[in-house]
Image: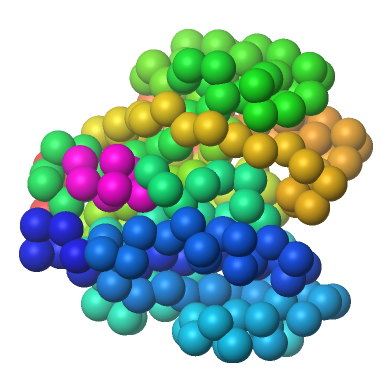
Amino acid sequence: MVNGKKVVMVMPAYNAASTLKKTIDELPVDIVDEILLVDDCSRDDTVSQAESLGIKTVVHTCNMGYGGNQKTCYKTALDLGADVVVMVHPDYQYTPLIISAMVSPIANGVFDCMLGSRILGTGARKGGMPVYKYIANRALTFFQNIMVGYHLSEYHTGYRAFSRELLERIPFDGNSDDFVFDNQMLCQIIYAGYDIGEVTCPTRYMDDSSSISFKRSVQYGLGVLKCSWETAAHRVGWIKSEFLKDVKKRTDS
């Protein structure tokens, strides 16, 4: 708990049995009140590992995709009474050791959303991010900052934290069930007028860390371009974007 706010850590999991305990071992237990793991129909023993560690677990009976998994994570965390929700991948790519830096600005009303950035500092390349992913990250982020009208060091980190108010007002349930969910949600947050903070985050690219293929990376990149263009076009009234049309400005009742 931070500043009297309940903190729930959510973990969207898929075949994370080999790294789950290492992730949990770095968890600051004085900050996180409850842990929720949502298993997306893993083929290994992720679920039994989570249960043996005493983690509250929700199991998808069929694979819902990365975005679909997050939807369950956030809705269930709200049902658990979370005031702040922080997402940590159970593949040990991001360390839970900086959770305090992620949730404190939200619990104290400074920001509505926090991102753990691999690009600030030297975390990305030092942690083993492939060169092509680093270049794509920088190019896409440059394009998005122009199109979306914001300034972030990256839009593609999976280390994120949100306030309860934000999750209750952003219509993320209608977003994609695939990886572009992340970008759609950030565009919704920015369009609605919420404030986003960033902290430097070390990262770890190893054989047991989850990673999408080159083909899926290209598909994701095209989805990001489309998402960014739609946001810009929707903002000036050229189109009505499906994922933005129901977003209410923060000043709206």
Which is nearer the eye, 25 or 71?
25
Image quadrant in which you'd find residue 138: top right
- Where residue 198 sits in the image (x, y, percent)? 36, 30
Q: Is residue 101 magenta?
A: yes
Magenta-highlighted residues: 99-105
> Which quadrant of the rendered structure holds the N terminus?
bottom left
Q: Is residue 69 left or right of residue 194?
A: right
- Where residue 22 sits in the image (x, y, percent)? 61, 61
Residue visible at 11% across and 46% down in the picture: 108
Residue visible at 31% across and 33% down in the picture: 196
Residue visible at 12% across and 44% down in the picture: 109
Total labels drawn: 0
> Which quadrant of the rendered structure holds the C terminus?
bottom left
7 lies above or below 207 = below
- Where residue 173 sits in the image (x, y, percent)? 49, 63
Q: Is residue 21 left or right of residue 65?
A: left
227 lies above or below 63 = above
Residue visible at 16% across and 58% down in the picture: 2
Which is nearer the eye, 67 or 27?
27
**Residue 4 visible in the shown view:** yes
Which is nearer the eye, 224 or 210?
210
Q: Is residue 150 magenta?
A: no
